[in-house]
């Protein structure tokens, strides 16, 4: 199995990749690209995609093996007829090839680095080591002290496209914090974390301290070999809500309360005239309890000692001051004991956020949470937050995506809209060419296509159960919505999923809906 494939030198032509896909459709990928991508490599099974752009390499993206049987480059028409190699998603696992075909050319998977300064790290969840360069990431080592020795680096929390995030002890307050250190070239006063803070402060000083949204509590600058870096101190938060369904002792009781808090967090932003822009379970974290009091030894016993991977230059030598000696594997906070997790949430990631009166030309929210007006017309507004809120409420309470994007291009998401909500308005219906495979002009299912389309009700979606394994006992149990609340939950969600953006409920109306009185308020 390929766990950390290297970049191709030179990259294969689109034609050769097309031939590979047609030859091995069961182990190929379906990929959506952006115009800045110039080359790709593919790997099989626990699949990784790595692209290259003019500015820097794109970080690895993990893709579920069964859900991506097809490779398509969306910036060319060359592969638009490849839908014939799709397979039914309900096929049993044992009917799906799960090994590398013997004649799959290894050079596509294991070629040497091309134009890279460093050797690839064996940690596929760490930052791209090529970002340790002038203008790039700040080199950090475990045990470092920052901001006049106020913040002591203990562990790595994560990394993104333009920053690393570290678990630190604030020796002034004795609390654990998350320290985000931004790339030098991205260190600006108008970075998303500071912009959202400024927007909130302009409307309400009280909202700055709300536990529902994660805002910086401190900031400072750090000078290093790669430049000057903006450092933001944020509250230490726990795992994403979509990774811990199996942690709750009584999920049927707790999950609606968490969904209600998620609605409150969005309502808070909307009351301040702010759109989140990327509202989904991945950006909703649980708050933690009991970690601040732990000494370092006890903390590491709980979190596990940091794992390090030595950084080497492409020729095998050690790097200079511009890179750390090693990268650190990020913590997996979803493994924390359930007693360390509270039932309270906090909304994060304001990189797509904007004032309601200054909408951007588009948003980077995944298709599964994107509204029709955003997908078809690139119309960014509060109405998209409301649509995403419906998808998020459903996912938190049921443990399942409402509109899963199985193939990566959004076609199956649109299909599911029509199955659940009926025919779209003409302006969108006529733009959706794929409709002819499933529906007649009136929106009635034709039963043709790779899999037959049929209408489904919201209550049917809600009533489906999910089997989960309890993280504490290891016993499998069923996660399902109680029958008594299905009707009201369905009514709430359908009011948020109206095709007409103006007809959707406001976030305030969502928090006042009668469903919460049944599921959230204690008797």
Image: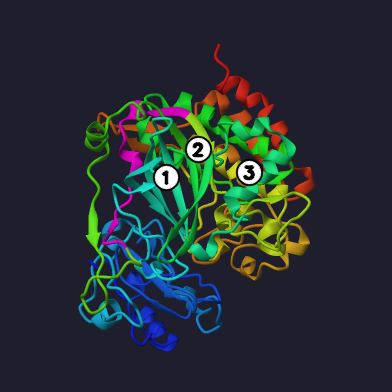
The residue under the point 44% across, 46% down is 147
Whether tag 3 and tag 1 are in contact, CB under 8 A, the answer is no
Q: Quadrant of residue 207?
A: top right
Q: Quadrant of residue 370?
A: bottom right
Q: CA distance from mark 3 to mark 1?
A: 24 Å
On screen, residue 477 above or below 225 = above
Circle 1 residues within 10 Å: few <14, some 14–19, many ≥20: few
The residue under the point 43% across, 88% down is 15
On screen, residue 5 above or below 234 = below
Whether tag 2 and tag 3 are in contact, CB under 8 A, the answer is no
Q: Position of residue 486 (x, y in %)?
A: 57, 30
Q: Quadrant of residue 245?
A: top left
Q: Which span of residues is magenta-colored?
A: 324-343
Q: Look at discs 2 and 3 and give the one toward the viewer.
A: 3
Residue located beneath label 2 in the image: 396
Residue located beneath label 3 in the image: 197
Query: The N terminus lies in which quarter of the figure?
Result: bottom left
Query: Is 471 a magenta residue?
Result: no
Q: CA distance from mark 2 to mark 3?
A: 27 Å
| Residue in the foreground of this view, choosing between 512 and 208 | 208
Q: Is residue 374 left or right of residue 248?
A: right
Q: Secondary structure at mark 2?
A: helix
Query: Is 340 a magenta residue?
Result: yes
Q: Is residue 335 left or right of residue 191?
A: left
The numbered dot on residue 148 is 1
């Amino acid at each position: 199995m390929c766990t950390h494939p290297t970049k191709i030198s030179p990259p294969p032509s689109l034609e050769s990749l097309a031939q590979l896909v047609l030859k091995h459709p069961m182990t190929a990928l379906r990929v959506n690209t952006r115009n800045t991508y110039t080359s790709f490599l593919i790997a099989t099974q626990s699949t990784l995609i790595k692209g290259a752009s003019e500015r820097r390499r794109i970080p690895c993206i993990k893709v579920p093996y069964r859900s991506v049987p097809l490779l398509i480059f969306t910036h060319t028409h060359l592969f638009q007829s490849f839908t014939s190699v799709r397979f039914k998603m309900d096929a049993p696992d044992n009917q799906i090839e799960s090994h590398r075909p013997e004649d799959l050319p290894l050079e596509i998977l294991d070629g040497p680095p091309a134009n890279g300064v460093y050797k690839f790290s064996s940690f596929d969840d760490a930052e791209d080591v090529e970002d340790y360069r002038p203008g790039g990431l700040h080199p950090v080592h475990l045990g470092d002290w920052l901001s006049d020795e106020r913040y002591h680096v203990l562990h790595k929390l994560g990394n993104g496209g333009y920053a690393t995030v570290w678990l630190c002890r604030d020796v002034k307050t004795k609390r654990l914090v998350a320290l985000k250190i931004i790339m030098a070239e991205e260190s600006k006063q108008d970075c998303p974390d500071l912009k959202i803070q400024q927007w909130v402060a302009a409307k309400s000083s009280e909202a700055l301290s709300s536990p529902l949204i994660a805002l910086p509590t401190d900031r400072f600058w750090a000078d290093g070999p790669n430049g000057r870096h903006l450092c933001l101190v944020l509250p230490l938060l726990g795992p994403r809500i979509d990774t811990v369904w199996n942690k709750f002792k009584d999920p049927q009781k707790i999950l609606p309360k968490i969904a209600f808090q998620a609605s409150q967090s969005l309502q808070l932003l909307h009351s301040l005239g702010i759109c989140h822009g990327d509202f989904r379970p991945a950006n909703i974290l649980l708050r933690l309890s009991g970690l601040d009091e732990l000494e370092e030894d006890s903390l590491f016993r709980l979190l596990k000692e940091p794992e390090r991977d030595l950084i080497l230059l492409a020729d095998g030598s050690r790097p200079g001051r511009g890179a750390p000696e090693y990268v650190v594997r990020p913590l997996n906070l979803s493994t924390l004991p359930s007693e360390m997790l509270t039932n309270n949430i906090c909304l994060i990631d304001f990189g797509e956020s904007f004032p309601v009166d200054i909408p951007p030309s588009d948003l980077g929210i995944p298709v599964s949470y994107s509204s029709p007006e955003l997908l078809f017309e690139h119309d960014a507004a509060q109405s998209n937050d409301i649509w995403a809120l419906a998808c998020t409420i459903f996912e938190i309470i049921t443990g399942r995506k409402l509109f899963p994007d199985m193939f990566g291009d959004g076609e199956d998401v649109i299909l599911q809209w029509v199955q659940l909500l009926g025919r779209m308005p003409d302006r969108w219906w006529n733009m959706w060419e794929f409709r002819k495979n499933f529906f007649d002009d009136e929106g009635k299912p034709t039963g043709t296509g790779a899999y037959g389309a049929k209408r489904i009700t919201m209550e049917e979606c809600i009533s489906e159960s999910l089997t989960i394994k309890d993280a504490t006992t290891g016993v499998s149990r069923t996660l399902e919505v109680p029958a008594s609340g299905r009707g009201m939950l369905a009514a709430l969600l359908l009011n948020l999923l109206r095709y007409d953006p103006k007809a959707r409920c406001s976030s305030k109306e969502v928090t006042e809906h009668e469903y919460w009185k049944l599921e959230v308020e204690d008797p």
